[in-house]
Amino acid sequence: MQAFPSFVQMSYSFRMTSEWWRTAAIYQIYPRSFADANGDGMGDLAGITSRLGDLHDLGIDAIWLSPFYTSPQRDAGYDVTDYCDVDPRFGTLADFDAMVAEAHARDIRVIVDLVPNHSSDQHVWFQAALAAAPGSAERARYLFRDGHGTAGGLPPNNWESVFGGPAWTRVTEADGMPGQWYLHLFDSSQPDFDWTNEVVREEFRRILRFWLDRGVDGFRVDVAHGMIKADGLPDYTPPTAGGSMGGAGGVTADALHDTVGTDATGVALEPEISDEAGDGAPYWAQDGVHEIYRDWRALLDEYPGERILAAEAWVDPLSRVAKWVRPDEMHQAFNFAYLETPWDAAALRTVIDASLDAFGAVGAPSTWVLSNHDVVRHATRLSVTEPNPQGHGLGPRSAGLPSYAPGLRRARAATALMLALPGSAYLYQGEELGLPEVIHLPDDARQDPTWFRTAGERYGRDGCRVPLPWEGSAPSYGFGPSDASWLPQPAQWAELARDQQRGVAGSTLSMYRDALARRREHGLASGSVEWLTGYPADVVALRNGDVIVVANTGSTAIELPAGDVLLTSEVLADRALAPDTTAWLRA
Ligand code: NOJ
């Protein structure tokens, strides 16, 4: 057993003591955009600590922090140089300890991001690899290969980076000549580790222990489907262009609609979701990843307090994602099939059934998520009328852009449905304020490597990462004490700021707060789904315990059933449930 710093032992007094992760509402903090304590325009750990009271009021159970580690920030911190330190932009290890202590004192658990697929090219190991010779132990920690063609001038295979362009970059050797190539599934500044190398495995055990010893409650594992590549690194051409974030194609709206029919209630028959591109990609979802997670699970289980692993695995179908959460592997996997489901009753019933079936089959909870730092915010996304492959983002030249109010209305209805489902729910900072995707960012403000690697063809993910508004009339809308903000904030942030919504009946913030409170009171997260009949096909109607949930995805109002109204996503004048509205009633 480990020796624990005393603050770790003292800080455990949670109301949820057993398998908390099965039902937790987990709030994603994107540190650079959450709250800025020192006024440099970049969020920081001290800023997070100062705002934990607001998250406690919201009613969440845990926070997940995107990376705050030492990093040149070529991919907003998903390019790490020191896995065991805090980047000075975000603070210090002492700031981290203070944040964890404050979170635990408020019954909020802390999950940190782990980025094991790749490091930064500035990592000491990669710099050593560049200085060393082909075939050296230093190079063996990454995936260096000789090129093909005359003098090795062609890349070792045809793989493409998720961010666009080739997945290989050629290095210059010590003699000044062009030399080997290294693999980077993401940006060229993010070289992939070779996870067949035991030295890499041992280093990550050390990193896990470092943060566990500091008291973290778990890890969100970045690119958890990509760490092992097929032997021989064979050529591969994905069947579809674009795709998801490190993705096996994800689940498309078409795939979800591709059912063989519906029963009398509109429930889709054969809820299996088709596998678009996951099978066959020699860099995603290789069986070898699972022994790594079994190893990590055993390590986490040595620690008290139910520390968890959550997989970012863009794999489909869901029955395949469930392999990541078998009893001796991870605790949770993100449900990206749910995130990618359109606002369509049949598709929603299908994906909810498929999720509960797939995760339930291995004894894991389903998770639910609608937004994160890689996707168009759902206040915009669910109403976009033209195809928009995940990761491409939205900007002024994009087609099918929705207007704000109808988009928000649909998003609120979608959230109210999601928070009624059994399992663990993920929220992304700012969605509780109804923030839309920021479309009109100036080109020269954009920072996502996707934007640069595609020469502006894809806008990328900056539009969902704009710093949060806290006070409508303060500089930087209260993001920090100055008016600095690493991405420009739109004027609309004034009315959407938290202080404008706090305690206001009908505000998005009030709806989230009420939904999280009712979810807890009625035990919805540990309940089950029973589909209700007798509703139009474009209405999702279910019972979870003593709560009836009705979500109207259609274009006609419907009469609510009998029962006290517990929650509505819009203020209702009477018992008519308008389009794009969700209601919870006491059964
Ligand atoms: C997934 C992360 O969520 C994303 O932001 C990042 O760019 C890639 N993995 C690469 O680490």
Image (cartoon, rainbow, N blue to C red):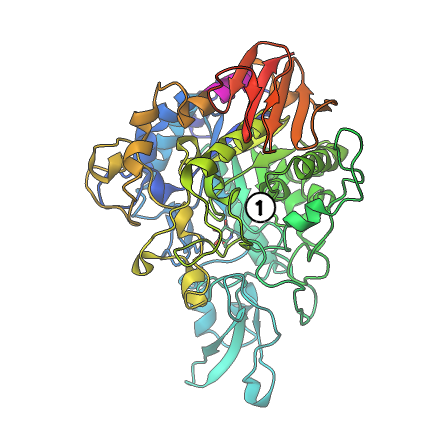
Whole-percent x and y of residue 262?
78, 37
x and y, in percent, of residue 198 in the image: 61, 57
Q: Is residue 59 visible?
A: no
Q: Position of residue 100 (x, y in %)?
A: 40, 30
Query: In the image shown, does 237 or 30 lie closer to the viewer?
Result: 237
Instruction: Examine the image and state in which quarter residue 318 appears.
Output: top right
Label 1 packing within 10 angstroms: few (<14), some (14-19), many (20+) = many
- Which quadrant holds residue 105? top left
- Is 516 a magenta residue? yes
Q: Dividing the image into 4 quarters, which one contains the C terminus?
A: top right
Question: In the image, is residue 30 above or below residue 71?
Answer: above
SS class, disc 1 = loop
Of residue 212 and residue 309, the one placed in the foreground of this image is 309
- Judged left or right of residue 123, residue 550 is right
Q: Which residues are magenta?
A: 514-520
Note whether 405 is above or below 293 in the view shown. above
Q: Amino acid at mark 1?
A: Glu
Instruction: Give the residue drawn at x 56%, y 15%.
Output: 575
Residue 132 seen by the camera: yes
Q: Nearer the viewer, residue 110 or 272?
A: 272
- Looking at the picture, does residue 159 appear above or below residue 59? below
Count of numbered tags: 1
Please say whether residue 199 is one of the residues in the magenta stretch: no
Judging by the rendered image, the residue that carries numbered circle 1 is: 312
